[in-house]
Image (cartoon, rainbow, N blue to C red):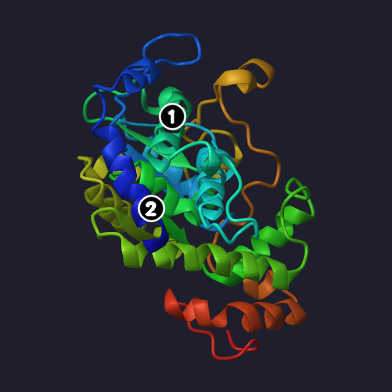
Amino acid sequence: MGRLAGVERCAARCAARRDAPDTEDCARDVTGRELSLDFDYTGANLVFVVGCPRSGTTWVQRLLATHPRIRTGQESDVFDLYVGPQLRAWQHELDPDSSGRGGVGLGCYFQQDQFLQILKRYTLELLQPMVGDLEAEELFVEKTPSHVLFIPEIVALLPRARFVHVVRDARDTVASLLGASRTWGRSWAPRRASNAAATWVTHVQAGLNAQRALPAAQFVEFHYEALHADGKRALRQLVDWLDVAWTDADIRSALERNSPDAARAGRGTPIPLGGEFAVSIGPVVKEPEGFIRQARAGAWRDDLTPVEKLAVWRVARSTMAEVGYTWSAPWSP
């Protein structure tokens, strides 16, 4: 995250300029209504659930959203598609050698403080529907898996946001990605085991980089298999890390309500939909058929062919070892 240290310092300076006329003018949404988020909003009540797609992030999201003080919504892509790429483009263009012409782009028209004020205002408007109406002690869980690739950019603008990095065995994740590629996820999921394994490595390595850069109170690694082995213990540890009070009985209820069978039948904790999709689809997320597959650890043994196992082993075995999944050979269990 060192490359964004200057951005973080400038963001802090921007926040300190709340008395400036342009800062006052910006604290309104697109309708002219005053934003409930202060310009110096730090993201303290915002929890990002991240990880490689098909790692169980939706399961974790639904479990947490069962708590009465935790709200959530559908994946927003707010940082991986919108804010994050703009901040990366700005950082890239600030290098005068990037164009070979001594500097091109918006850096020719704005200083860093000015650009970050604009980007922060934009970010606040995009976050308003998620966190703008939260009450004291409420949290919002934002679950976009690939936000793990943009944690430095998120922290640069929201320095107190927290992150739950959901990690699942690469072999099961690859099997799930390949299954999605043949059905509901054919528009985005990798079709080859080697590509799916590379996707897993990229996401998990991004999480490891963030874990090294952030304090333990801001970033936690949470294993999918722990929910299967002892769901009550795993969920208890997670809510304790979030500093959220929850009884053992309520934790049991959350796990029962969001079991794979219950989720397949549409009885899991609902994920609200707003905006345009609330009009065209309805008020809650309806997952496609096949979204929840076997939902068990170790299914890769039957799901992957020997050739696919070899591909995963070649690409992912080193990163697997870093996060606790040792695999000596592709033919070993």
From the viewer's perspective, tell me whether residue 197 is left or right of residue 78: right
Q: Is residue 11 visible?
A: yes
- Quadrant in which residue 64 is drawn: top left
Write down the residue under mark 1.
127
Outermost residue on the top side: it is: 32
| Residue 62 seen in the current view | no
Vertical placement of 168 versus 315: above or below?
A: above
| Quadrant of the rendering where the N terminus is positioned | bottom left
In percent of the image, x 44 and y 43: which residue is there? 61
Which residue is at the front of the view, 176 or 121? 121
Quick check: 5 above or below 69? below
Q: What percent of the width, then of the height, locates residue 79?
A: 51, 42
Q: Which residue is mark 2?
A: 164
1 or 2: tag closer to the N-terminus: 1
The part of the image, by quadrant, that contains residue 296 is bottom right
Quadrant of residue 23 in the image? Answer: top left
Query: x, y percentage for residue 140?
Result: 37, 34
Q: Secondary structure at mark 2?
A: strand
Mark 1 vs mark 2: in front: 1
